[in-house]
Every structure is written in C-alpha cells, then in structure tokens.
Image: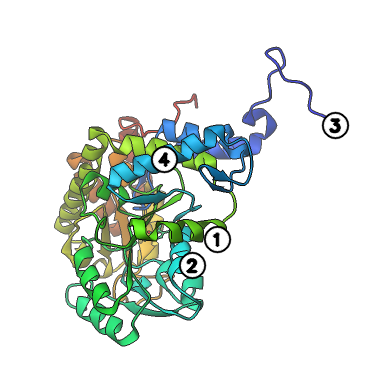
Amino acid sequence: MSQPATNSRNPEPTLAQVDPEIDALIRQEERREFEKLRLIPSENYASRAVIEATGSVLTNKYSEGYAGKRYYEGQQAIDGIESLAIDRLKALFGADHANVQPYSGSPANLAVYLAFCSPGDPIMGLGLPAGGHLTHGWKVSITGKYFESHAYGVRKDDHRIDFDEVRRLAKEHRPKVIWCGTTAYPRVVDFARFREIADEVDAILCADIAHISGLVAAGAHPSPVGIADVITSTTHKTLRGPRGGMILCKQEHAKAMDRAVFPGLQGGPHNHTTAAIAVAAKEASTPEFKAYAHQIVANAKELAQALSEKGFSLVTGGTDNHLILVDLTPKGVPGKVAAQALDRAGIVCNYNSIPFDPRKPFDPSGLRIGTPAITSRGMGPSEMKRLAGWMDDVVTHHEDETVLARIAGEITELCQDFAPPGIPIRDA
Ligand SMILES: *Cc1c(COP(=O)(O)O)cnc(C)c1O
C-alpha cells in the first residue's frame, strides 16, 4: 500500500499518532529528566537547538568520505555542515585538525588503535578499577583482547595516578600508544607528565577527554592540545552536544586519523549528529558556556565539601573537576543499595568501584556522582547543600520508603524552579 499524499489538508501523522507506545515512553523519559536530580557525571541536557539539529532530515543522507571527496552525490549542504563543525571545534580547542565522524567515544578510540597499532602491539592505559575506560585496554574490551595491554593504576596512599608505575611499565613494555584520560577520576590529569614519559619511550600519547571536553573548552581543566599527539572525546558529556565522538590531532597525524575513521572503521557519517556537534561547538564558544563549565566545577567542590561535612568519605578527599567518587564503606551501605535507594528518592547516580575496592564490580563500595546536568539547570551552591543533606538522609534511611518518597516529592518541587534545557514544556 502506498502512502497517501500529504498536504496541508492531509498532514503527515505525528509520532503520537503513528506510534503511541514509543511516544508515551519518550514523554515518560522527558518527565524523568525534568523531575529528577541527574547526577550521572557522563550525562547532561543537550539544548533545544542541538536536539532540533539531531532530529533533522540530515539522518536521510549518505556521505561516505570527507568534504570535497565524497562517494555519493548531493553533498551541497552536507559539506558545509561538516566543514562548519570541524572549523568550530578547531577554533574552540585551538587544534590543528578535527574529525567529527566517529559514531561515539568508543569508535573514536578504536580509530586511534587502527591508526597507530598492529594487532598484538603493546599499549597502556589507566586500569578500569582505578578510573580508566574500557577502551583503554581493559581485558573484556576488544582493546584488551586484540592488543597487549599493560594497565597502570593509582597510588595506594592518595589514589592519584601513579606516575612511577606509568614510567616503569612504559620502559618495560615500550607501548605504541599511551592513553591518558579517565571516566571515574576526580582530579586534574597532568598531561605534561604523560608527555615526558611518552617521549622517553617514543610512544604516541592519546588524551581521551570524553568526560571533561566541556571543561577543557572553557578553560576549567588544563588542555592537552599541543601536548598529546591525538585527543579523543565524546560530544555529549560536559561538552553538551549530541551523542557522538570527535578526534583532534596534530597536523602530522591528520591523514592517518581521517583514514582510520573512514574507510578504516566506519561507513557513512551520521550527518544529523555532525550538524548538532557544530551547534554545540558554537554554543560552547560563548561566555555563557564558559561560566557554565566553571560553575560545574564550583558546584562539584561545594557538593564535595557538603558531603564531607555529612561524614561521607571521598576518594582523594575531594574533586578538581565535575565528579566525585564516594566511598560508602564508613556509612556501612554498599554502593548498589545506596544507588537504588537514591534513585527511588529522585537522585539518579551510579554505583562504582573505588580504587582497591574489596567488593565485586557488580556490587562495589562506591558511588559516582557529577554536577554537569544539575548545573545545566542553573543550580548552584545552595542546591548543592540541600542535595548533600538529601543524600545523607537516603543513605541513612535507605530501607525507609516513607523517607525516600518524601525526598522524591521535595526534589520534584525543587526541579520545577530549574527547568532544564532541551525539554519542551507540555501539558501533563
Ligand atoms: C564515555 C567515555 C568513552 C566512551 O564513549 P561512548 O560514547 O560511550 O562510546 C570513552 N572514553 C572515556 C574516558 C569515557 O568517559
């Protein structure tokens, strides 16, 4: 059966008409994102402009290749879009070269392996239990199976990156690539110290700034540009763009990185995502975004202080960035139990291993929380203090559903005053 022609008298049906089930579930998620305090440090609220670009007809277009060198015709608009995304990111980060085609952070990292390594080559990254990412060579990841991975860790006494170990392992194994970058580490990454070690063993240094790229863009975390050979990132975490990935690199690696992404690893780029990355890069170059990124860090420090005052133990004692790793051992509550009770109370975070965790990864001792999303709502120091109080009450009374329901109500009420970006106001 062919579709009836659509026109102003016979408009195309809406999502709600075509698929009420999916529409209702999307509305449910909108409501959740509005009414809860979202503390997962890798999550954020993309702006309405970013979401509009993501939900555009650009999803219909194939454009394998790069601007001016495509394998399909009809790229008049696409080339302009991809070039704008690239130029804006280069300007934002001060980078020689940018590739905006990686489908997400993990494929961006795979492209680095493809560009510089052969199967079985030695590589190094921060171990997952110490705050590293799966794609930095952890054993269950393809990156730990196809390469000879030597993980470095953090020091036992202060839980900071153990540079003596990084140097010792690098000299012993001569890695092709050294990864620096983290997913659960509350402190500044010292890119220059990694550079020294990479130079001693002639390794490619890759900084994965997936979590902190928004902070880096705004000067709220030191930049690896000019230090690392290659920089990879997601675009949807603190950078507040669409779900996607990007690679920045020195000019000498531009060709190798572009070839690794396409045709090495991927087919057609996601043009709707590329357009939204361009929008996010434009937003991130404003004074408002700069203030936002600094406020993320200020809020994290405020929250860390308030949690410490409530008797929470924090890994490394605090934070320099957007995230806090809580060790719940002194509270006598496992991370998973706490995370589930917090979710019922309207505070969404994730349970997480802490360095040298005596408990299992699926039932660890810690919680990972972050301030990017709540800061996007405009929350500040006084909300951080309230949040610490609520978290303490939930952890203390995690089995008392009356307490959890009362807090959930208070949080829903607070959230009415802090409408997040990107969520349309709808009738209930
Ligand atoms: C989130 C993250 C990634 C992976 O990004 P995906 O988009 O989930 O594939 C890679 N590296 C680090 C450090 C991350 O935090």
Ligand 1 has an atom within 8 Å of the beta carbon of the residue at disc 3: no
On residue 354, the disc is none
Residue to which mark 2 is pinned:
114
Mark 4 residue CB less than 8 A from any atom of ligand 1:
no
From this view, report whether residue 7 is shown above or below residue 13: above
The local crowd at label 1, few if under 14, some if 14 to 19, many if 20 or more residues have their Cα within 10 Å, is: some
- Residue 238 % position (x, y): 33, 47
- Residue 29 location in percent, x, y? 50, 41
Mark 2 closeness class: few <14, some 14–19, many ≥20 residues within 10 Å: some
Task: Return the residue at label 1.
Answer: 265
Which comes sooner in the sequence, label 3 or label 4? Answer: 3
Query: Distance between the Cα atoms at labels 1 and 4?
Result: 20 Å
Q: Which residue does the numbered mark 3 point to in the structure image?
A: 1
Badge 4 density bin: few <14, some 14–19, many ≥20, Cα 10 Å: many
Q: Earlier in the sequence, mark 1 or mark 2?
A: 2
Question: Given contact means CB atoms under 8 Å apart, are the residues at marks 1 and 2 in contact?
Answer: yes
Q: On the picture, is 204 further left or further right than 380?
A: right
Q: How far apart in space, not on screen, are marks 3 and 1 (Cα)? A: 38 Å
The residue at the far right in this view is 1
Residue under the image location 48 percent in, 35 percent down = 80
- Outermost residue on the bottom side: it is 172
Left or right, residue 378 beside residue 98: left
Using a 10 Å C-alpha cutoff, classify the residue at mark 3 as few (fewer than 14 neighbours), some (14 to 19) or many (20 or more): few
Mark 2: which amino acid?
Leu
Per the model, the C-alpha gap separating discs 3 and 2 is 46 Å
Image marks 3 and 1: residues in contact by CB distance under 8 Å: no
**Label located before the other in sequence (4 or 2):** 4
Residue 55 in sight: no
Task: Check whether the beta carbons of the residues at disc 4 and disc 2 lie within 8 A of each other.
Answer: no
Q: CA distance from mark 4 to mark 2?
A: 24 Å
Q: Residue at x 50, y 27 (%)?
A: 428
Mark 3 to mark 4: distance in Å?
40 Å
